[in-house]
Image (tube, rainbow, N blue to C red):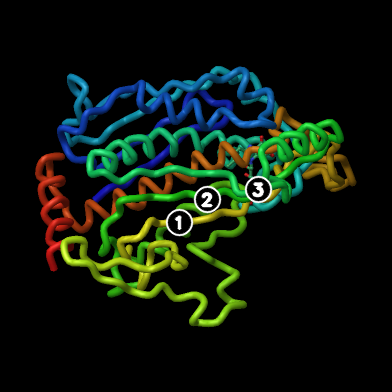
Amino acid sequence: MLGFLTAGESHGQALVAILEGCPADLPLTEKEIALDLARRQGGHGRGGRMKIESDHATLLSGVRHGKTIGSPIALLIPNKSTTFFEKAFTQLRPGHADMAGSLKYGLKDARNILERASARETAARVAVGAVARKLLSELGIKISSRIVSIGGAAKQADWQELIDETGLQGDTLGGVFEVEAVNVPAGLGSHVHWDRRLDGNLARGVMAIPAIKGVELGLGFIQAELLGSQVHDEIMYKKGKGFSHKTNHAGGLEGGMTNGEPVIIRAAMKPISTLAKPLNSVDLASKKPVKAFVERSDVCAVEAAAVVGEAVVALEIAQAVLEKFGGDTLKELSGRFTSYKKSLAVL
Ligand SMILES: Cc1cc2nc3c(=O)[nH]c(=O)nc-3n(C[C@H](O)[C@H](O)[C@H](O)COP(=O)(O)O)c2cc1C
């Protein structure tokens, strides 16, 4: 079973992640993890923080001579920007965890909440997700993402212009991204119990990315307006290839299980909450009206969020693969995986 924990504050010393349950003998380098970390830091509309940080995850444990050894994999991502950590603030920011978190923990300074609720934590998720991605790639499963739209604009040149204009006005944007996993065999996840349904686990993983407010699989919400005959994917069979579908409106999942088609999951990200031209709010201490606190911030982070989306999808699919096939070593896992895939083709 694959599981992970993350720790660390946005402007604390470092982010830490521990991934447990990765089989032994998976080739893994810090360079591979760095590639995904760099992708998370990119994208049009990112703020000043990204110019300061250039993330690198050090593999502290679980890897020897470039291969995993089956023990927990600990990763350390130091923060370069730690200067804000000591600074208190009370001007609660709408759209952030500040108000609810300060009430929940009985705080007079919202800094504790900002520091952990910050999407900086997603760097740790991307680092462990890179390990899951590597494991899946050894089995032929590939995960990618694309931007569907930003602020309603569906063409890159248009959304880049929109981001620039919006930033100049002190405002922010959100958008929609799509994650796709290909070469996923039928039968990951299960219909037998709600918490084993892979659709639910994928939706939870993606929805748990900060600022994600909508998740859909395949055709998603539009299905509610269509006829059954327009939605459901007709089943076909070819000797030597096995079962497949004529279309993939279901996004690769039926009954909480993968059905052999690409897994397609889309997420809607709300506009960034911190506005350079701040919204009206209330001061936590004085209870008087104030302008919201402003800290270095992105105008738009949809491209970065898509990379986080890939990471969480990789982690959920890798977990489902390990649940079905198990194995202490990569050889054991891939042997079982390959023979299952062959058995599906010759059914
Ligand atoms: C990759 C990424 C980068 C983000 N960058 C910022 C940012 O620079 N400023 C900001 O206010 N919110 C940013 N957010 C969103 C906030 O973290 C998020 O809206 C906030 O923590 C409240 O959580 P909620 O929107 O899920 O309710 C980012 C989110 C992601 C996924």
Instruction: Identify residue type, mark 2.
Output: Glu
Residue shown at 15% from the left, 32% from the top = 25
Instruction: Identify residue type, mark 3.
Output: Ser
Residue shown at 35% from the left, 50% from the top = 182
| Location of residue 108 in the rendering, given as x and y in whole percent from the top left corner | 71, 41
| Location of residue 323 in the rendering, given as x and y in whole percent from the top left corner | 22, 56
Give the residue at the far bottom of this rendering.
228
| Location of residue 43 in the rendering, given as x and y in whole percent from the top left corner | 61, 31
Q: Secondary structure at mark 3?
A: strand
- Pick the front one: 120 or 40: 40
Looking at the image, is 79 positioned above or below residue 140?
above
Q: Secondary structure at mark 2?
A: strand
Which numbered circle lies on residue 178?
A: 2
Residue shown at 50% from the left, 30% from the top = 39
Looking at the image, is 276 positioned above or below residue 201?
above
**Residue placed under numbered mark 1 in the picture:** 264
- Pick the front one: 333 or 209: 333
